[in-house]
Image (spheres, rainbow, N blue to C red):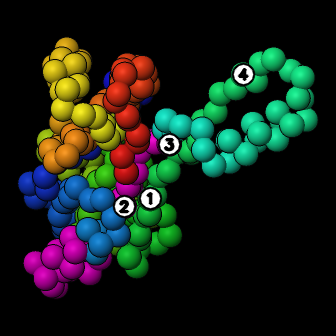
Amino acid sequence: MENDAYKTIEKPSEETLFKDRNSKFFGYAFPVLNDGDVKDAIDLLKKKHHSARHFCYAYQIGIEQLEYRANDDGDVKDAIDLLKKKHHSARHFCYAYQIGIEQLEYRANDDGEPNNSAGMPIYGQIQSFEVTNVLIVSVRYFGGTKLGVGGLINAYKTSAQITLQASEIIEKTIDIFFQLNFQYDMMNKVMRIVKEKNLTIVSQKLELDCEYVICIRKKDAQSIFEIFKNLYKVDIVKHD
């Protein structure tokens, strides 16, 4: 898998069931993008399994995303200007920069089970399957026999494992969005590049001039940006 792609699930999984000494572990996987999605999924399961004792879960949200900057304003410009004043006789001020860090949010919840006997084994399977933007819940009905910490770890791990195996895991790309502004006489040239590079036009506004928002895979973003940047009478900026 390339470094601008990630694995996730697009829809909730089928319900799975793992049994150990009369305890039942019902497993579910949900695609999530924020804490609200997590809460909604847990609330839904609590209504469905109103007599269950434990709703143990783990989730991970986020992907490795480095901010892409297509101009030199802000802190970068201030730093360059400062150096130009300091080294006023220098001929070249060459530089490069990268902004951003790996932003991953995760949580593991034991929901009354012994510490680290439920949530972390579930989260371990999220890591093992290398998926993100996903919530795994294992709903336990106590069967009358205590499993011990080791038994619980194995049960919740297995429940999460078979749930992810039952899920449809897909690969998505990290995409960058740019806004193009140009006059109508540049329409043909812009559209030629869009077709040649197989770009996606997300939205367009055709009024006194033209405004396109295009979607580009992260690994191609720099080269596509340079193409439009060097195109006469076409302005390109990052679109949030």
Looking at the picture, tell me which residue is in the foreground, 97 or 50: 97
For discs 1 and 3, the disc positioned in front in the rendered view:
3
Q: Examine the rendered structure and indicate whether residue 97 appears above or below residue 39.
A: above
Residue where numbered disc 4 is placed: 94
Residue 3 visible in the current orientation: yes
Q: Assess whether mark 1 and mark 4 are in contact (beta carbons under 8 angstroms).
A: no
Would residue 48 be found to the left or right of residue 39 on screen?
left
Residue where numbered disc 2 is placed: 58
Q: Residue drawn 47% across and 52% down? A: 104
For the record, the magenta segment spans 40-67
Residues at marks 2 and 1, CA–CA distance in whole angstroms: 7 Å
Label for residue 106? Answer: 1
Q: Examine the rendered structure and indicate whether residue 41 appears above or below residue 176.
A: below
Residue where numbered disc 3 is placed: 67
Q: Examine the rendered structure and indicate whether residue 226 appears above or below residue 63.
A: above
Q: Earlier in the sequence, mark 1 or mark 3?
A: 3
Q: Look at label 1 and name its amino acid.
A: Tyr
Q: Look at label 3 and name its amino acid.
A: Glu
Residues at marks 4 and 1, CA–CA distance in whole angstroms: 39 Å
Q: Badge 2, how many Cα within 10 Å: few under 14, some, many 20+?
A: many
Q: Assess whether mark 1 and mark 2 are in contact (beta carbons under 8 angstroms).
A: yes
Q: Earlier in the sequence, mark 2 or mark 1?
A: 2
Would residue 199 be found to the left or right of residue 118 on screen?
left
Label for residue 53? Answer: none
Q: Badge 1, how many Cα within 10 Å: few under 14, some, many 20+?
A: some
For discs 3 and 4, the disc positioned in front in the rendered view:
4
Looking at the picture, tell me which residue is in the foreground, 42 or 173: 173
Q: Earlier in the sequence, mark 3 or mark 4?
A: 3
Q: Look at label 4 and name its amino acid.
A: Cys
